[in-house]
Image (spheres, rainbow, N blue to C red):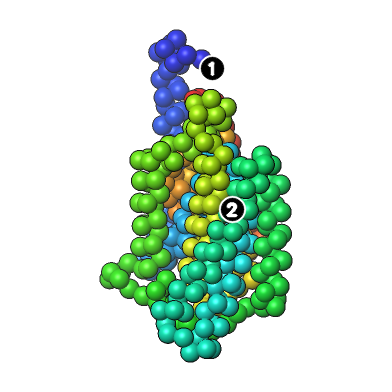
Amino acid sequence: MTDAASLSAPEAARRSLVGWLLVLSLPLLMAVMELSVYAVEPRVLSLRNIVNVLDQASYAFVFASAQMMVILTRGFDLSLGTSVSTVSVASALAMTGLVAAGAPDALVVAAGLIAGLGVGALVGLFNGGFVAGLGINPFVVTLGSLNICLGLSTTISGGGPVFNVPDVFSRLFYNGKLMPGVSIPIMIAVLIGLGLYFLLNHTTFGRSLYIIGNNPRAARVAGLPSRRYLMFAYLACSLLAAFGGLMLTARTGSGEPNLGGSLMLESIAAAVIGGVSLQGGVGGVGAVVFGALFVTMLSNSMDLLEVGGYVQQILLGCVIIIAIFLDRLRQTRA
């Protein structure tokens, strides 16, 4: 790697310019995209649509934050989407069962939260146990748990939605209002973002994740309990995904065995597009905010332009490849 002190003035200036362009590339691209769509479909910059984008981005942020926790350690979670489906079905079954038994609202909501977060914790411990405890590749482990969760969500739901999730649950996590003009999902996303910022920047656990991602061998030599922190990273990922699954269940009003269909791809895309490096050790809450906004704005713009769903998947795949290319550029100049 070239020593920065040995660079000539023109070369140092060029690298500095490239660095700033990479940092500003996503906000500039977002602005250009919105203005381009506005020329064809003015509704994209209407107040109603902007509020809708922020609301949708709050969900994308929660799931991208979940992926960030493991991507920082050079891993990822392919099971995120199907685990969300399992969380949705399990929480809905728990709540509807208690509603049928005449249980009070507080107990019903508590049962839904315990069931959903419990499923998330089990998935996280399963993934983390095999990745951190046995050293198995995250791709293999999370691909296996993807299929396990897919089978579980389909089996326990009978292959169909679980209807009649109580209104009190939806009011608490979706359509209630704590502040005028600010939806519950946005407030939850803000609180999660602040919590993660503190965790990653002001705790030993958070700083250790960056060290493990940057250089796993150096982390072990330094005496960090890498396996324990890696286990906690997968547990945190699954718990965040489970909470996002509960939010989606409140929005749909039912437990859906197919709820997390595209969430795995979208969550990885939002994290990587924002600047969380697949090489590990790089990224943060700010990167995930921009990534979630970009993915949501892209999807929203394509919806307004009536672009087909399959074409949207193609474009999202292309955007992911471009994001990985930009990530390589950042690594090259580091």
Q: Quadrant of the N terminus?
A: top right
Circle 2 SS class: helix
Q: Position of residue 198 (x, y in %)?
A: 35, 46
Residue drawn 64% across and 62% down? Answer: 82
Image coordinates of residue 286 in percent, x first then y, are 40, 45
221 to 201, vertically: above or below: above
Q: Nearer the viewer, mark 2 or mark 1?
A: 2
Element class at badge 1: loop
Q: Position of residue 122 (x, y in %)?
A: 59, 59
Q: Sequence-wise, which precedes: disc 2 or disc 1?
A: 1
What residue is shown with label 2?
A: 125
Residues 251 and 91: in front is 91
Q: Which mark is residue 1?
A: 1
Quick check: 200 left or right of 237?
left
Q: Residues within 10 Å of mark 2 (few under 14, many from 20)?
A: many
- Amino acid tagged 1: Met
Q: Percent x, y for residue 113?
A: 48, 69
Quadrant assignment, res 43: bottom left
Name the residue furthest left. Answer: 180
